[in-house]
Image (spheres, rainbow, N blue to C red):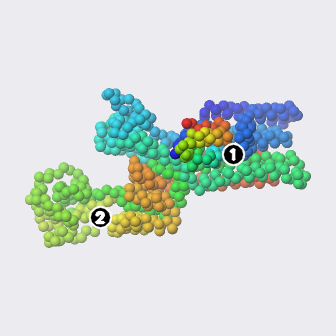
């Protein structure tokens, strides 16, 4: 399932790229794209574990930039 | 500026002033020793405490190549070797640069969202005789909504009451409003003119034109151009490589060649300061985003950076004929009377075709344009594949192809005009011809010239139409070649052949060209306001069917690619030079700060040029 979320306080393009790379590695994620300009993240991941994956993605974002949040 | 940005600016200005005062005090020898150190340290902490905190947090998360961390290491190392001014300067300018970056990005983000300000906020739904504002999301298909003057049409639908002008500029870039009345389709995102209209919705919000366009532009970032992919690969290796080089630079010469530690640590700091690839990581996607944004502003949607890139490189442009180069509607293009006036010939033909359902008859009636007195017509007879025989006001009239008249023993010279020619005879005498053909779009010639001026080497026409008609259009538009009598399968084969000769842009009307649109390097669909099929199949969608807009978006694509290339070359060159000078000990920390922040700023400013919309 593919879903799109807004992101808050994503303020460096390089960070967005690092987050993408980290989230890609989460098992169950088929593809991820962070649009720095629109401040949006699109995650395509396993349906059954989507919430769990999203939690991990949130953690990954925080590890790059502690203020950054995925708005659900 | 946001509140946080203003606060940062204040902090930077205050610390900057204090820093300048400290520099002066030190210069005149008023402050020395540990007092000076303490004051510099205070200034440093005041301007950079958040960077230090962030660096600490990120290290805990294992993010070694984080720019906060690298800046922290560089500035602390500078303190350690006694370069207090540089330490404060690095942090001060780093913060200032970050601020400028966030302001610039915020501004371009705003100008893009302004471009995309086509989102309707509400729909006026009528219930119990009262209008209530509801979220467009909640309006089911088939509801009747009221759109008041000045409001944005929230959902696609059909006008059921009222008549007005709608402003489609936000979607098509076209400034002349379009008039709509009962039965006309309207699309969401347009602005209703002077009169209110009632619209019966045909789509839910999610499928309406507005949300499809927004989604398309937002998702454009996912299809990356070569340059973007290069940058993300580059960024992955650049920072670790430069950091590793910095470590080697700091450690090797002092250990192996007994060089002074301080000097080599200073050189290593220069490396650390320029180790962030931010200039490229921000400016390249920003450039593509701006180019796609500028293009959508004129009503041309480009579905991704890769298509923008291909558009800029197109060597061959292949056009479909009907509906793309021509208007796709058949009209009377020539009236050649023989012994009659034009008006009387046209009236005669219109009366004769009065009962006929054929498209040719319809276009002759449309050309006549007045109400017909069909009581004059009697003994009407259609002769399949040939024409019409009728008696009009007592005169025996024949309307049809040449062989039909010749068979009746009526002598008529062959017409030289292209298209479908209707020969007319009255009481056994040839009275003239009326030619019906598809008209070439008035702007097509200019557009082709503009496309060629952009460096496209060949413009080719592909059509299923007859060779004679194709030849005339090709000659008129000065096309380089044309292929006529093509079946849909032949078109694909033709495109395959053209593909092997260079980057190919195919332009079609999107209705029956889907396989060819997919096959070409870039497929552009024309004149497809609200047509789902075209938006789906094509890589580039020209919202109204103006060919000049295609040329304009090719120009935007070229400009965007130039900006992106400039940024890549400029940023890499400056960083390489600073790294070299830094290794040789010539570059100061000050120069390094410029190499990091200054280059990023200049590159962002350059990228923002891509947002500018060219005049048509």
Please state which of residues B464 and B349 is positioned toward the viewer in this rendering.
B464
Query: Is residue B604 among the parts visible in the rendering?
Result: no
Q: Mark 1 sits on what residue? A: B598
* Quarter occupied by the N terminus of chain B: top right
Q: Is residue B433 left or right of residue B586?
A: left
- Secondary structure beneath disc 1? helix
Residue B52 x, y percent position in the rendering = 74, 37
- Badge 2, how many Cα within 10 Å: few under 14, some, many 20+? some
Q: Which mark is residue B419?
A: 2
Residue B324 picture quarter: bottom left
The residue at the point 44 percent across, 59 percent down is B517
The tally of labels here is 2
Residue B364 x, y percent position in the rendering = 23, 57
Task: Return the chain for callout 1.
Answer: B
Instruction: Tell me how far mark 2 sits from mark 1, CA to CA.
Output: 63 Å
Please state which of residues A65 and B283 is positioned toward the viewer in this rendering.
A65
């Amino acid at each position: 399932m593919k879903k799109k979320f807004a992101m808050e306080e994503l303020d460096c393009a390089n960070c967005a790229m690092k987050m993408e790379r980290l989230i890609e590695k989460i098992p169950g994620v088929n593809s991820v794209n962070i649009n720095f300009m629109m401040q949006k993240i699109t995650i395509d991941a396993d349906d059954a574990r989507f919430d769990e994956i999203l939690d991990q993605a949130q953690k990954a974002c925080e590890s790059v930039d502690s203020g950054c949040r995925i708005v659900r | 500026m946001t509140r946080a940005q203003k606060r940062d600016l204040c902090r930077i200005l205050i610390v900057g002033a204090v820093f300048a005062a400290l520099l002066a005090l030190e210069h005149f020898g008023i402050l020395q020793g540990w007092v000076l150190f303490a004051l510099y340290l205070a200034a440093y902490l005041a301007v950079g405490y958040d960077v230090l905190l962030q660096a600490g947090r990120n290290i805990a998360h294992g993010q070694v190549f984080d720019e906060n961390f690298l800046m922290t290491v560089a500035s602390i190392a500078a303190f350690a070797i006694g370069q207090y001014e540089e330490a404060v300067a690095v942090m001060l300018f780093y913060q200032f640069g970050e601020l400028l970056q966030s302001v610039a990005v915020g501004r371009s983000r705003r100008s893009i969202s302004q471009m995309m300000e086509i989102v309707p906020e509400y729909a006026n739904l009528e219930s119990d005789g009262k209008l209530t504002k509801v979220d467009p999301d909640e309006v089911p298909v088939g509801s009747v909504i009221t759109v008041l003057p000045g409001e944005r049409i929230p959902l696609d639908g059909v006008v059921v009451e009222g008549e007005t002008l709608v402003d489609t500029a936000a979607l098509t870039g076209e400034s002349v409003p379009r008039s709509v009345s009962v039965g006309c389709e309207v699309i969401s995102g347009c602005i209703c003119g002077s009169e209110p209209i009632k619209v019966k919705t045909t789509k839910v919000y999610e499928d309406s034109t507005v949300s499809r366009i927004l989604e398309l532009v937002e998702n454009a970032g996912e299809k990356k151009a070569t340059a973007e992919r290069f940058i993300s690969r580059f960024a992955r290796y650049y920072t670790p490589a430069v950091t590793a080089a910095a470590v080697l630079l700091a450690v090797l010469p002092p250990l192996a060649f007994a060089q002074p530690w301080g000097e080599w640590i200073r050189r290593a700091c220069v490396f650390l300061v320029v180790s962030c690839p931010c200039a490229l990581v921000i400016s390249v996607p920003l450039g593509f985003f701006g180019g796609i944004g500028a293009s959508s502003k004129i009503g041309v949607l480009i579905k991704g950076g890769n298509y923008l890139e291909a558009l800029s490189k197109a060597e061959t442009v292949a056009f479909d004929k009907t509906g793309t180069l021509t208007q796709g509607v058949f009209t009377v293009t020539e009236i050649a009377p023989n012994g009659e006036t034009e008006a009387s010939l046209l009236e005669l033909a219109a009366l004769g075709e009065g009962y006929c359902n054929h498209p040719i008859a319809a276009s002759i009636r449309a050309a006549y344009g007045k109400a017909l007195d069909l009581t004059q017509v009697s003994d009407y007879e259609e002769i399949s594949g040939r024409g019409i025989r009728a008696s009009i006001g007592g005169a025996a009239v024949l309307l049809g192809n040449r062989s039909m008249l010749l068979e009746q023993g009526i002598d008529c010279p062959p017409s030289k005009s292209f298209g479908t020619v209707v020969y007319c005879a009255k009481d056994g005498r040839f009275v003239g011809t009326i030619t019906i053909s598809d008209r070439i779009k008035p702007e097509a010639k200019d557009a082709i010239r503009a496309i060629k001026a952009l460096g496209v080497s060949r413009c080719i026409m592909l059509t299923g139409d007859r060779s004679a008609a194709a030849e005339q259009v090709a000659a008129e538009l000065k096309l380089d070649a044309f292929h006529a009598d093509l079946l849909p399968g032949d078109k694909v084969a033709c495109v395959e052949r053209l593909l092997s000769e260079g980057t190919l842009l195919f332009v079609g009307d999107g209705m029956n060209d889907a396989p060819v649109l997919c096959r070409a390097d870039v497929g552009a669909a024309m004149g497809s306001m609200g047509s789902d099929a075209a938006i789906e199949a094509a890589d580039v969608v020209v919202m109204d069917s103006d060919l000049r807009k295609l040329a304009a978006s090719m120009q935007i694509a070229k400009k965007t690619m130039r900006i992106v290339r400039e940024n890549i070359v400029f940023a890499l060159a400056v960083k390489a030079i600073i790294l070299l000078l830094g290794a040789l000990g010539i570059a100061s920390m000050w120069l390094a700060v410029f190499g990091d922040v200054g280059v990023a700023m200049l590159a962002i400013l350059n990228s923002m040029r891509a947002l500018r919309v060219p005049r048509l």
